[in-house]
Amino acid sequence: MGSDLEGDIGSGGLTPAQTRGLWALILAMFSVNVGVGLIIPLLPIYSEAMGASGLLIGLIFGANPFVRGASMLTFGSLADRKGKKKFLQLGMSGYFVVAVGFVLATTPLHLLFLRIGQGFLSAMIAPVARAYAGQMSPLHQEGKIMGMINAGFFAGFAAGPLVGGVLADMFGMVAPFAAMAALSAIAAILVKLFVPEQLPLPIDPAVDRSERDRYMEIMRDDTVRGILAIRSSVAMGRGIFSALLPLFAQGVIGLTAGQVGLVVTVRPLLSSLLQPGFGRLADRHNRKWLAIGGFILAPIAFSLVPATRAFAHLLLLAVMLGLSTGISVPAATSIAVDRGREYGMGRIMGLEGMWQSFAMAIGAISGGAFLDGFGYTNAFRAASAIGLIGISISLYFLKDYRDSHVEVPSAVGEVD
């Protein structure tokens, strides 16, 4: 089974076992992210109802990405050497336990500790799943395969907030957390039954180095630096935006939980719909400019939030953010997969995920502090400025980047 899973990476297609594994993984990612998406727009409100301050809300929101970032390098490296399926199973099973904990929580400190635990578990899921998909991607079709796995990822986040808001309005704030537990269990079962183990990447003893030396080598790569700069800066702005938007939408504009869920849903829904098409586009056109052109929409949207006073206006900004992610992420992830073939897929996805997670955590925490000290307007303006600075740094590091992929016939390697 192992050789069948690896396939012939240069042949232009996936083996039947790889295809089945990919679709099972997409469905599992969709299920677990529906569960996570259920609680994301409600978590700040849930925390505030327990008496949390703005800063503590930021800490609760930021604990997950901070701990996830601190754990990703370890799990990315272990996944390259030990195999990826076991980490996916453990992370999704652990999500079930954490979701039950959210149902039983009674104080903001309970929420903080649960988010810390969730951070460790999430480090075993998204980056490892992307590394799994990246390792099976045929040459010159990285955008297509990563677009598919990202579509499952974002579709789950798209469905979750809207359903979570409706559940909260109809059955109370605990209902979305109970639903998260059930969906996490479904995702773990899907991985257990249908996702084959993937052979660890071979390591040549003649060139084997310590993990520290490997990561130092990766960080000297200007292409990697450019991708990390743009993705982490936009993630920091998104951390500010995500932590404060539910409070802004309810406290300033007066939206219901269901309306907040709809606003939060639009970005990942549109992004999910765009991922496969822009993934294929990234396989045939300049990935650098697709990534930068998409990402620049995010800071523009962040800067417009303070002037928003209507539900329809927030929806339009969510559409901008959905376009930003849908256009940019397939191209940026394809570039990362290309570098992962040289440095190790788990390492590259873990490193990228670590930077994004730390950035989102810092954004969420600083957003809460900005809210306490300077108000919503300055917090959202800071999110915009951070994104623009990161894009400028990325342009510098990617100035000499050239796409390594070549034009290939459109019929080659289609996934059934």
Image (spheres, helix red, strand yellow):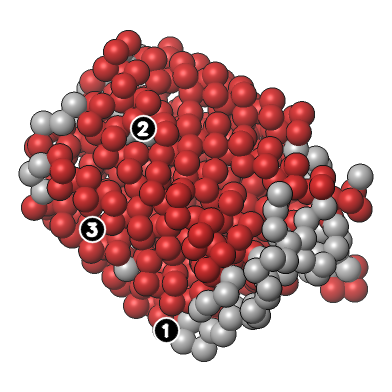
Q: Is residue 379 left or right of residue 128?
A: left
* Residue that appears at 35% across and 53% down: 322
* Residue at the outermost front position: 411
Q: Is residue 76 at least partly visible in the picture?
A: no
Q: CA distance from mark 1 to mark 3?
A: 23 Å
Closer to us: 205 or 224: 224
- At horizontal 43% and vertical 15% (from top left) the residue drawn is 103
SS class, disc 1:
helix
Relative to 72, 307 lies left or right: left
Q: Position of residue 330 (x, y in %)?
A: 52, 61
Helix, strand or loop under label 2: helix
Residue 122 drawn above or below residue 106: below
Q: Indicate the amino acid at tag 1.
A: Tyr
Residue on which disc 1 sits: 396
Q: Nearer the viewer, mark 1 or mark 3?
A: 3
**Which is nearer the N-term, disc 3 or disc 2?**
2
The CA span between labels 2 and 1 is 37 Å
Dot 2 crowding, Cα within 10 Å, few <14, some 14–19, many 20+: many
Label 1, residues with CA under 10 Å away: few <14, some 14-19, many ≥20: few
Eye-nearest disc, 2 or 1: 2
Residue shown at 78% from the left, 56% from the top: 14
**Residue 104 visible in the displayed image:** yes
Of the residues shown, which amino acid type is indicated by label 2? Pro
Please name the residue shown 23% across and 56% down the image. 302
Helix, strand or loop at label 3? It is helix
Residue 310 in the image: x percent, y percent? 10, 42
Q: Which numbered disc, 2 or 1, marks the residue that appears first in the sequence?
A: 2
Q: Is residue 249 left or right of residue 62?
A: left
Q: Position of residue 350 (x, y in %)?
A: 60, 55
Q: Quadrant of residue 334?
A: bottom right
The numbered dot on residue 301 is: 3
* Residue position for label 2: 161
